[in-house]
Image (spheres, helix red, strand yellow):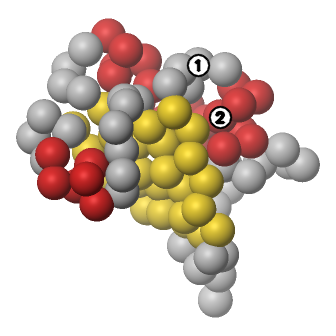
Amino acid sequence: MRERRLIRLYISGATPRSAAAVEALKALLDELNEECELEIIDVYQQAGRAGQDDVLITPTLIEKSHGTVRRLVGDLGDRRRLRAALGLTGR
C-alpha cells in the first residue's frame, strides 16, 4: 500500500493572496491521479499549528510523503515551483 501524501497549506485569513494560493494548489491537485490528504490551515485561527511546523510566513506549503518533507514559501502561482515543491518535476 502506498503512503498517502500529506499536504498542508498555511494561509493568513481570507485575503486575496490566501485565496490565490488555495486556488493554485487545488488546480494542480485536481490534475494528479493520486490520493492525498490536504489540510488548509489559517494561522489566524490555528496559530499553534503554525508553530508546530515552524511556519513564519504565509502562504507556506508543506508536503510530506515517503519520509521526505518539502516546503514552498510565498507565491504558489508559479506552476513550475509548485510542481517541484510537490516532487512532480518528472511527471
Percent x, y of residue 27: 55, 31
Secondary structure of the residue carrying numbered label 2: helix
* Residue shown at 44% from the left, 25% from the top: 21
Secondary structure of the residue carrying numbered label 1: loop
* Residue shown at 13% from the left, 34% from the top: 44
Q: Quadrant of the N terminus?
A: bottom right
Left or right: 91 with respect to 41?
Answer: right
Percent x, y of residue 28: 61, 36
Circles 2, 1 touching at the beta carbon (< 8 Å): yes
Q: Looking at the picture, does residue 78 appear above or below residue 50?
A: above
The crowding category of the residue bearing disc 2, from other C-alpha atoms within 10 Å (few below 14, some 14 to 19, many at least 20), is many
Question: Which three-letter amino acid code belongs to the residue tagged 1?
Answer: Gly
* Residue shown at 42% from the left, 18% from the top: 20
Percent x, y of residue 49: 22, 55
Q: Which residue is mark 2?
A: 82
Q: Residue furthest left?
A: 45
- What number of labels is visible? 2
Q: Residue furthest right?
A: 90
Q: Residue furthest bottom?
A: 1
Q: Along the line of sight, which residue is nearer the eye, 52 or 7? A: 52
Percent x, y of residue 16: 32, 10
Cα separation, mark 2 vs mark 1, equals 8 Å
Q: Which residue is mark 1?
A: 77
| First along the sequence among labels 2 and 1 | 1
Q: Which mark is residue 87?
A: none
* Residue shown at 27% from the left, 49% from the top: 50
Left or right: 88 with respect to 58?
Answer: right
Hey, which quadrant is residue 76 in on the image? top right
Left or right: 43 with respect to 61?
Answer: left
The answer to whether residue 35 of the structure is visible from this angle is no
Q: Looking at the picture, does residue 50 appear above or below residue 21?
A: below
The crowding category of the residue bearing disc 1, from other C-alpha atoms within 10 Å (few below 14, some 14 to 19, many at least 20), is some
